[in-house]
Image (spheres, grey):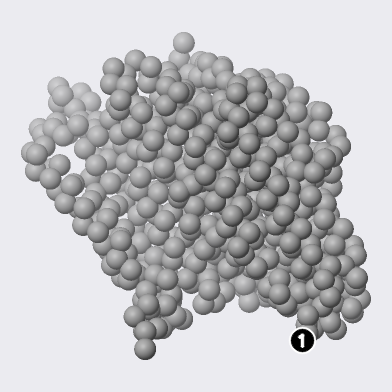
């Protein structure tokens, strides 16, 4: 399980960073989203990965750490709000600037 | 329950909510803006006096014992920053009354300003790492909205960079928090500081330190992570720029000071050397960037970067005197940079442009404004007896004392280049003959409306602050000595937070 988990994290982060480095706002937003997914999963794994142990004291002998789960929930909600804002910003920028380049102007169009 | 430590967070939250309730009436929103920020300043002063009497003021939220709940804690540093938040909030609120157009006021300018202040105050006062992240996000979301309010072309372009880089830094911050929790199993900062010394794997601690450095370095606009700042700070309304330059980057600086005195103080030779060179490059690149600019606000934005370097230098030298200097610089720079931005807004109001090439002769027609600018500009450059001189003097002396001659030399040279930049603005805007095509009517016409008076009041408060810091700095320095003492000996902080369980 650990191996699969860490490979997933690695792929998510790599894709996120790659998309973040593209110069179009839409890929940048996708990249940020993938990256925040990776971070959330990473945060979750910091409570140690284990099965058969719900976060209940007294019911089971070995219980999982509930704190990272609470942190991840908080981070997901915040990340959702941020993504929503970024999407609206990118839409507005695309309308105002008439293209979706992060610098606000398309370098290819300037060439004769 | 300690009311004084929670009020600086509570008041702007309440004021923001009230402003939303009276959404349709800008009249009430304006009153709430001024009264709310004044109350914030008052609560900050109350907190400061409590901290001076007791050393630390601690409040455990929900009365949960220390490492388990969220702790709100103020030492002298936090309390001084809370006072600064109140002061900047009040000044910008008063200035906004005269400078923010009605279209912005109708779309929630004042509620956003309050929420921004709540996020800033929360970041200064929290004693919990994850809670710090939450306050950062509260502050960021408000700043995103303030930055894009109005929706002009340049704003959009700047905002995309600002938003992307800040979200990226949040991602790094969050994963560092995760790593930290995985290592020591706690998020309470005092508890982390206590337990981190027992961690066997010291290499991992240094990795974490650098990750936090990157995350906060982006927020504070330190080299080589500052590019978002000059791209975005000149685009919104000048009151917003002033608030950002005066407060937002200081939150990053505060977080660096907190983390690298309280938690990462084990391997100073490694971590603080990185900070030292980052500080040097920040100073130089910022000031060189400013030298190439010919737009009033862009020059100021680049100088913000350069001045951030001095503050990090104070932390990186890591002696009591250097900390005093660095933190004095934080206060001084907040006052001066906010003031300069506000003056640029006033000049814009009189002339309709920020471009240095299109400006001139302001001194002849408006000597009062020119004198105000001169005081703030000379203070930024570090001319005695203004506040900037003492800030630079303490840092330089601290640098010489421990033999960091290269960086002290850089600091002095950058001071000279700052003076050059300020003289450039002075010569271009205030002194040279008016260029052809400049609209002189507004500049010559007498200003008697309430808008101008609000703007001048805001600037006047800041100028008074700069002069007070310069001529009456002794009590402030004495307070900062206590502050540096507390930062160099974090045991007091740890004991105050965790004391309940023993």
Pick the residue in front: B478 or A64. Answer: B478
Quadrant assignment for the N terminus of chain B: top right
Pick the residue in front: B328 or B452. Answer: B328
Residue visible at 52% across and 26% down in the picture: B261
Residue B415 spot, x, y in % from top left: 69, 45
Residue B99 spot, x, y in % from top left: 73, 69
Q: Quarter of the image holding residue B402?
A: top right
Q: Is residue B501 visible?
A: yes
Q: Mark 1 lies on which chain?
A: B
Residue visible at 57% across and 47% down in the picture: B284
Residue visible at 73% across and 33% down in the picture: B393
Q: Is residue B230 above or below residue A2?
A: below
Left/right placement of residue B460 relative to residue B51 reads right
Residue behind mark 1:
B437
Residue B304 spot, x, y in % from top left: 61, 52
Q: Is residue B58 above or below residue B240?
A: above
């Amino acid at each position: 399980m650990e191996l699969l988990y860490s490979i997933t994290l690695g792929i998510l982060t790599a894709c996120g960073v790659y998309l973040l480095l593209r110069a179009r706002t839409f890929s940048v937003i996708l990249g940020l989203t993938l990256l925040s997914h990776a971070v959330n999963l990473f945060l979750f794994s910091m409570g140690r990965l284990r099965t058969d142990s719900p976060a209940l004291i007294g019911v089971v002998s070995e219980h999982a750490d509930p704190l990272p789960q609470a942190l991840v929930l908080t981070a997901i909600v915040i990340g959702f709000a941020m993504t929503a804002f970024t999407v609206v910003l990118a839409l507005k920028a695309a309308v105002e600037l008439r293209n979706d380049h992060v610098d606000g102007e398309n370098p290819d169009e300037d060439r004769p | 329950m300690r009311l004084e430590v929670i009020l600086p967070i509570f008041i702007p939250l309440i004021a923001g909510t009230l402003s939303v309730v009276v959404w349709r009436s800008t009249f009430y929103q304006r009153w709430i803006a001024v009264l709310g920020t004044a109350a914030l300043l008052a609560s900050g002063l109350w907190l400061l006096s409590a901290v001076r009497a007791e050393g630390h003021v601690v409040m455990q939220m929900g009365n949960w014992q220390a490492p388990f709940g969220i702790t709100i804690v103020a030492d002298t540093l936090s309390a001084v920053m809370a006072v600064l938040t109140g002061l900047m909030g009040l000044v910008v609120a008063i200035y906004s009354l005269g400078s923010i157009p009605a279209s912005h006021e109708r779309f929630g300018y004042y509620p956003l300003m309050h929420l921004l202040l709540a996020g800033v105050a929360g970041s200064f006062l929290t004693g919990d790492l994850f809670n710090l992240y939450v306050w950062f996000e509260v502050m960021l979301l408000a700043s995103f909205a303030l930055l894009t309010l109005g929706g002009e072309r340049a704003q959009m372009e700047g905002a995309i960079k600002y938003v992307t880089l800040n979200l990226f830094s949040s991602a790094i911050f969050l994963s560092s928090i995760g790593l930290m929790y995985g290592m020591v199993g706690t998020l309470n900062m005092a508890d982390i500081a206590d337990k981190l010394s027992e961690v066997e794997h010291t290499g991992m601690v240094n990795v974490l330190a650098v990750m936090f450095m990157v995350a906060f370095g982006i927020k504070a606009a330190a080299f080589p992570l500052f590019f978002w700042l000059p791209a975005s700070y000149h685009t919104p309304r000048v009151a917003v720029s002033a608030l950002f330059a005066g407060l937002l980057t200081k939150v990053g600086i505060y977080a660096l000071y907190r983390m690298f005195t309280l938690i990462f103080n084990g391997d100073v030779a490694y971590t603080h050397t990185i900070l030292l060179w980052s500080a040097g490059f920040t100073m130089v690149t910022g000031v060189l960037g400013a030298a190439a600019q010919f737009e009033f606000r862009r020059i100021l934005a680049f100088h913000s970067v350069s001045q951030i370097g001095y503050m990090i230098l104070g932390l990186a030298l890591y002696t009591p005197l250097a900390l005093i200097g660095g933190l004095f610089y934080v206060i001084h720079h907040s006052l001066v940079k906010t003031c300069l931005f506000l003056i640029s807004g006033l000049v814009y109001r009189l002339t309709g442009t920020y471009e240095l090439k299109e400006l001139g002769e302001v001194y002849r027609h408006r000597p009062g404004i020119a004198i105000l600018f001169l005081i703030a500009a000379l203070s930024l450059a570090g001319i005695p007896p203004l506040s900037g001189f003492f800030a630079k003097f303490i840092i330089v002396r601290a640098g010489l004392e421990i033999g960091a001659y290269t960086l002290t030399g850089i600091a002095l040279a950058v001071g000279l280049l700052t003076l050059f930049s300020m003289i450039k603005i002075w010569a271009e805007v205030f002194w040279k003959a008016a260029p052809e095509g400049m609209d002189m009517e507004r500049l010559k016409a007498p200003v008697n409306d309430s808008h101008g008076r609000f703007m001048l009041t805001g600037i006047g408060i800041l100028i008074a602050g700069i002069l007070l810091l310069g001529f009456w700095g002794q009590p402030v320095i004495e307070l900062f000595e206590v502050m540096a003492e507390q930062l160099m000996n974090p045991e007091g902080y740890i004991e105050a937070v965790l004391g309940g369980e023993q």
